[in-house]
Image (cartoon, helix red, strand yellow):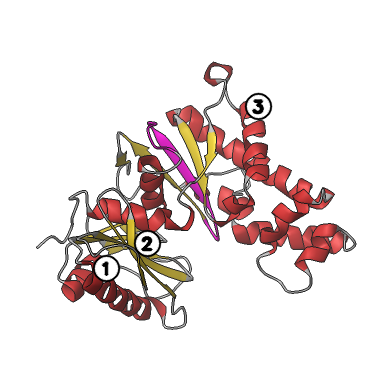
Amino acid sequence: MRIMGERARTYLGVEVGGTKLQIVAADSSGRVIARWRQAADRAGGGRAIARQIAAGVELVAAETGPLAVGVGFGGPVDWKAGRICRSHQIEGWEDFPIGQWLTEHSGLPVVVENDSNCAALAEATLGAGAGLDPVFYFNLGSGVGGGIVIGGDVYHGLAPGEAEFGHLRLDRTGATVESRCSGWAVDQRIRALSGAQPEGVLAGLIGTNPGGESRHLAEGIEKRDPLARQVIDELADDLAFALSHAVHLMHPAVIVMGGGLSLIGEPLRHAIAEALPKYVMEAFLPAMPLRLAKLAEDAVPIGAALLAGSGRMQNAK
């Protein structure tokens, strides 16, 4: 754990991902005071990861004296009850009352939210969407998620509804945004195309070790590799088509893109922004700005900390 600055009473924001756990202590303005990170115990499952979280919260709380805890979980949650519904990546989280459990272990009130909603709130409040309303956020990582912030608050819809951007259909065969645009889907696409073009720049960059191929796209674009350009353009077109539905339904003031694939940066952002207008009705043109997330890896835990400071507590004492 790394402490930055003076000891202060703060709010804790916990990010529970499929591979990474992160806790930040932040003040009411979102300024990070301390952070703690650890790899998730995937082999141990949900209960083992819960114990990791409790230990991390205890450690950071001892140093920073927080008032409350916010949890951003990578999967569907019952935010009103502070309960995890399930994880699509790790067994053992089914119907787990993480809010109550963490309150019992820490003695602190806890608020629980989906991780994309936390990131959306952070970006709308402090990041790329600050000062604009409404804000539509989507993240591209191992999965694809979305979040909507209206009037400074996360929009949920009727339970168990959320802004499930990743589950939007791209056609009538059942293809979804997640099945085509998630990190694993893009990696798979790169492997397939590279196998047919083994002499290309991108094929040389990814080598023979499978996994994480998409991290080489930015370099491939920089080196003007046609295969990298093809992957980016196809990904951008799918995302632009999907985003057009969000535009037509809610006409946000800004669209913010986060997650690991967003680290491709301007080549991907620009390609999506260029493709979007052809799918948007003329009355909505020019299309609203599409921006890269500003808070990067801190978006989820900072958003969770902001929620902890909002007073929306399921397990207040």
Q: Which residue is at 74% across, 59% downward?
A: 190
Q: Residues within 10 Å of mark 2 (few under 14, many from 20)?
A: many
- Kindly give the residue lying farthest to the front in the view shown: 6
Marks 2 and 3 close (CB-CB < 8 Å): no
Residue designated by label 3: 278
Residue designated by label 1: 98
Q: Earlier in the sequence, mark 2 or mark 3?
A: 2
Q: Which residue is at 39% across, 37% downward?
A: 130
Residue 127 location (% of width, % of height): 42, 43
Distance Cα–Cα, label 2 vs label 3: 35 Å
Q: Which mark is residue 73?
A: 2
Q: Which residue is at 79% across, 70% downward?
A: 207
Q: Amino acid at mark 2?
A: Phe
Residue 189 location (% of width, % of height): 72, 57
Extent of the magenta region: 129-143
Horizontal side of residue 118 vs 108, given as left or right = right
Distance Cα–Cα, label 2 vs label 1: 10 Å
Instruction: Give the main secondary structure of the magenta stretch.
Output: loop
Secondary element under disc 3, as helix, strand or loop, is helix
Residue 57 location (% of width, % of height): 28, 72
Marks 2 and 1 close (CB-CB < 8 Å): yes
Q: Earlier in the sequence, mark 3 or mark 1?
A: 1
